[in-house]
Image: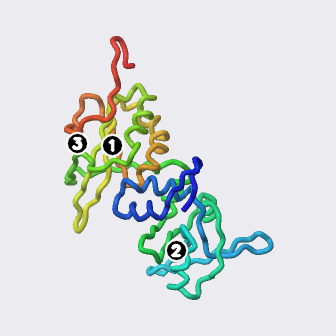
Amino acid sequence: MTVAADSEPVDVEALLAAAATDATVRPAFVTALLESTVFVPGTVSGERTVKLANLIGPDGQSRQPFYTSEERLNETVLAVPDIDRNFITLPCRDFWEMTRGATLVLNPHSAHGKEFLPGEIAQQLDGAATLTPRVVQADTRIMVGRPAHVPPGMTEALTALLREYREVDEARLGWKVTPQEDSFDESYLLVIVGDPSVRDRLGPGLAKTLVAYSTAHPVDVMFAQPGAGHVLGDVPPFYRRRKGLFRRG
């Protein structure tokens, strides 16, 4: 449990449980977690040196555990009796900064836990999603349509960003499924229609806008020129620039 800036209580554990089955809750969960105080096994020496206790995962790799409450930490104490029973409390954001580059695991012996990889942590701390160019082979089979769920505030945040670029005509948000050999690769698909010159200038702002919402599912971004066909042609745009008599406006 933590307290938000407006003194309204936020139950991080309830959000974690909800996020386990509802991807649209994940952005709110991560935001609440970063603003909370967490419990970490370890000690602080007289020289103010912090020594944290870690866990070894099934793959033999080290993971740094942390917890939403002392009760969740005690579940690990019962499961791993030789772990350091001392703990420290500190703001989650500070803890993540301290452990940059490590793999973290939240509430590892509870009914609901979450592993955070170094890249995922860096995105949240730096406030920007990583935009990686990707080429899709021509014979790749994909299925697209309207998303069943959209993280609250996602289209509003994107609309506010796109309004700043007069070169963007419209934007559509869909859901993309790429069947694989034994699974499905699923993600949101954002198609931005406009002048190609805006692509590079839009990148930094788009990365910052998507960082919270890509925690629900990955977001693939496609750029299309006005008048050109694209895979979301049947999905209504959530943003369309109004055009004046003599200019876009």
User: Which numbered disc flags the more N-terminal residue, 2 or 1?
Assistant: 2
Q: Quadrant of residue 68?
A: bottom right
From this view, report whether residue 69 is shown above or below residue 151: below
Residue 18: x %, y % from top left: 39, 61
Amino acid at the residue labelled 3: Val
The residue sitting at 69% across, 75% down in the picture is: 43
Dot 1 surroundings within 10 Å: few (below 14), some, or many (20 or more)?
A: some
Q: Nearer the viewer, residue 122 or 109?
A: 109
Q: What colour scheme was applied to this rendering of the protein?
A: rainbow
Task: Give the distance between the C-alpha atoms of the residues marked 3 and 1, in whole angstroms.
Answer: 10 Å
Q: What label sits on residue 190 in the rendered view? A: 1
Query: In the image as oriented, which residue stretches furthest toward the top?
Result: 246
- Answer with left or right where residue 91 lies relative to residue 219: right
The residue beneath circle 2 is 72
Mark 3 falls on what kind of element? loop
Identify the amino acid type marked 1. Answer: Leu
